Image: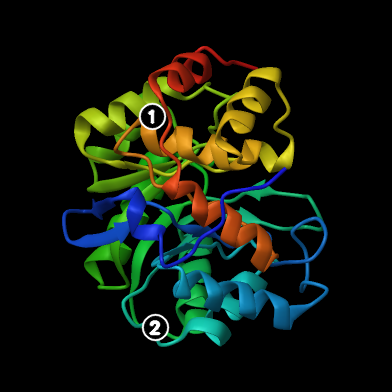
């Protein structure tokens, strides 16, 4: 099947969103989790290819890159610094709050001292004095949430982070955090077939927060007759349709599809040029896993 491919610099075609009211980014971003080895562990098989992907993303107009201390761990941040430093016109967001005992293993750790250790490590690896958007990767159920939020507030007071986001949280947790500090974004698992956090999307839109869906392409597992039919009508891939739907679904959504392939990157960014019809949206809105 022929797929929609970029002919110029299309990322801005998705429109922009203002993080915290002062950081304006294109709504087609890039997630760096796939720039690591198998199990999100260790370096990628071809580090030079990871660098090319990041630099090509900038060529295509992507100016928001999302990573985390846990990706590798540390590997994705190091590659981003190698490829993009000193980040002219770019916003680099990262996260802290996970320990990595091994490949595909993730353990929440929201102890204030661990969060500080991760933040300081991110600052060193990214070669910056302040993180523009630092996100609490998870609210650790083993540590009082208030302690975690107060620790992040202190980091912000020290000038180590500019804006704060949360990941995989409910509306109640967001509101609890907002009693302690200002939240500008929420990053939850969400895609066209996984709508568990629909109420959080609605909340973010209503409150002026960015919603950053992780697994926006369901880790490449999207396969449904409806998606296939809409993709065929547009001469696109199901993944491009899934991204186009997210961008249309809510103006609060900032997508961050990740890939280690330049070809897939170009296809993802080209989704900004797809214009879904009312028929498409009606069919896709009814799609659930």
Q: From the viewer's side, name the closer residue of 234 and 137.
A: 234
Q: Position of residue 254 (x, y in %)?
A: 39, 47
What mark, if any, has residue 249 been given in the picture?
Answer: 1
Q: How far apart, in angstroms, are the residues tagged by discs 2 and 1?
A: 34 Å
Q: Please state the total of marks drawn on the protein image.
A: 2
x 53%, y 67%: residue: 118
- Image: 113 above or below 144: below
Q: Which of the marked residues, 2 or 1, is nearer the chain's N terminus? A: 2
- The residue pinned by badge 2 equals 128
Residue 141 visible at all: no
x 39%, y 19%: residue: 278
What mark, if any, has residue 48 been given in the picture?
Answer: none
Q: Quadrant of residue 33?
A: bottom right
x 34%, y 34%: residue: 174
Q: From the viewer's side, name the closer residue of 253 and 235.
A: 235
Residue 209 visible at all: yes
Q: Answer left or right for 261 relative to 160.
A: right
User: Dot 2 surroundings within 10 Å: few (below 14), some, or many (20 or more)?
Assistant: some
Q: Answer left or right for 110 relative to 102.
A: left
Label 1: element kind: helix
**Can you say which quadrant of the picture contains the C terminus?**
top right
Q: Answer left or right for 228 relative to 137.
A: right
User: Dot 1 surroundings within 10 Å: few (below 14), some, or many (20 or more)?
Assistant: some
Q: Are marks 2 and 1 in contact (CB under 8 Å)?
A: no
Q: From the viewer's side, name the closer residue of 103 and 288.
A: 288
Q: Position of residue 115 (x, y in %)?
A: 49, 61
């Amino acid at each position: 099947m022929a797929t929609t491919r970029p002919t110029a610099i299309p990322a801005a075609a998705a429109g922009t969103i203002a993080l915290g009211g002062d950081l304006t980014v294109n709504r087609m971003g890039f997630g760096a989790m796939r720039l690591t080895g198998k199990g999100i562990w260790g370096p990628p098989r071809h580090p030079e290819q990871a660098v090319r992907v990041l630099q090509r993303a900038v060529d295509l107009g992507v100016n928001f890159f999302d990573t985390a201390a846990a990706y590798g761990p540390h590997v994705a941040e190091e590659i981003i610094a190698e490829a993009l430093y000193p980040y002219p016109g770019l916003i680099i967001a990262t996260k802290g709050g996970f320990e990595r005992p091994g490949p595909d293993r993730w353990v929440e750790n929201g102890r204030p001292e661990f969060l500080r250790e991760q933040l300081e490590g991110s600052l060193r690896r990214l070669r910056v004095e302040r993180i523009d958007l630092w996100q609490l990767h998870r609210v650790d159920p083993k540590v009082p949430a208030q302690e975690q939020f107060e620790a992040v507030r202190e980091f912000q007071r020290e000038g180590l982070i500019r804006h704060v986001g949360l990941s995989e949280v409910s509306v109640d947790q967001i509101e609890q955090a907002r009693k302690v500090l200002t939240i500008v974004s929420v990053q939850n698992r969400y895609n066209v077939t996984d709508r568990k956090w629909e109420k959080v999307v609605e909340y973010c839109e209503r409150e002026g927060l960015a919603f950053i869906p992780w697994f926006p392409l369901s880790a490449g597992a999207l396969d449904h007759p409806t998606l296939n039919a809409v993709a065929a009508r547009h001469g696109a891939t199901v993944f491009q349709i899934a991204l186009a739907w997210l961008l249309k679904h809510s103006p609060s959504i900032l997508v961050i599809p990740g890939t280690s392939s330049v070809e897939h990157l170009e296809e993802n960014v080209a989704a900004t040029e797809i214009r879904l019809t009312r028929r498409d949206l009606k069919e896709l809105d009814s799609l659930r896993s």
